[in-house]
Amino acid sequence: MKTFAIIPAGGKGVRSGVATPKQYLKFYGKELIAYTLEVFQKNKFVDEIITVVSPSYFSLIQNLKKKYKLKKLTGIVEGGKERQDSVYNGLKSISANKNDLIIVHDAARPLLPQDILTKAIKTAKNKGNSLVCLKVRDTLIVGNKVVKDYLDRNQIFNVQTPQIFKYSDLMEAMNFAYKSKFYGTDESILIRNIGKKIHIVEGSPLNFKITTKEDLQIFKKLTK
């Protein structure tokens, strides 16, 4: 059984308020995406890494591969219109067996702890899939201007990545989604749509997705 990591990095990052897509911004001389790729390069359970990017960044990724000795980075694939299209392009680019594991991880989550990645991989090997989530800590309400109800936070999670599935399951889910003309916000939704039970792995606040200007500032302070 092999483990492939697909890193979709074709987004434009408009919410970060900067001209350059956030995954290519430099922090202390290193591109944000390089921090993310190194997480997977260093994990002994990851066999190959595939990045899915805009063609205008192909040469940059090649340079990062050499500069940071990303030997597991075996594929640089053109992204699609939506995230789902990009992940699908990555899936189609690899030679995988049906039980091989596919990790999908956001390029803009560069602080994924190694122990969580390892636990997610081991869970997927034992149970068929895994979804890294962070249990909410705040009181949650439903309402608009006034409180209508309170939600049980013990049963509510923020979904993160990595999300890990068997190659055959994820390919089936992708094909079903396209046949149904459905676009999901992440891969777990697609897997659930084909009737699969998804197993939760506890995430980390450090594994936040860099989206806004404030996120960029937090990341810069954490990596100083």
Image (cartoon, rainbow, N blue to C red):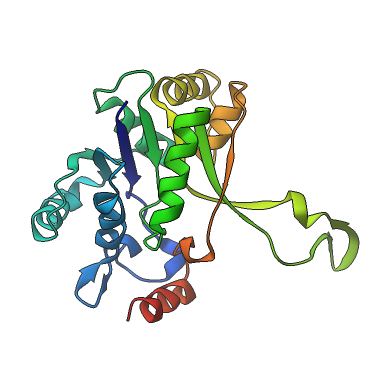
From the viewer's perspective, is 191 left or right of 139?
left
From the viewer's perspective, is 171 left or right of 44?
right
The location of residue 202, given as percent across then percent down, is: 57, 52
Determine the residue positioned at 14% across, 47% down. 71
Determine the residue positioned at 72% across, 51% down. 156
Residue 224 position (above or below residue 164): below
Determine the residue positioned at 41% across, 19% down. 168
- In which quadrant will I find the N terminus? top left
Residue 111 position (above or below residue 189): below
- In which quadrant will I find the C terminus? bottom left
The location of residue 129, given as percent across then percent down, is: 50, 32
Instruction: Look at the image and tell me whether residue 82 can be seen.
Output: no
Residue 10 position (above or below residue 146): above
Instruction: Look at the image and tell me whether residue 107 can be seen.
Output: yes
Q: Quadrant of residue 68?
A: bottom left
The location of residue 98, given as percent across then percent down, is: 37, 18
The location of residue 31, given as percent across then percent down, is: 24, 66
From the viewer's perspective, is 47 left or right of 168?
left
Q: Quadrant of residue 87?
A: top left
Residue 113 position (above or below residue 81): below
Instruction: Give 173 or 120, whichever is nearer the viewer.
Output: 120
Q: How many marks?
A: 0
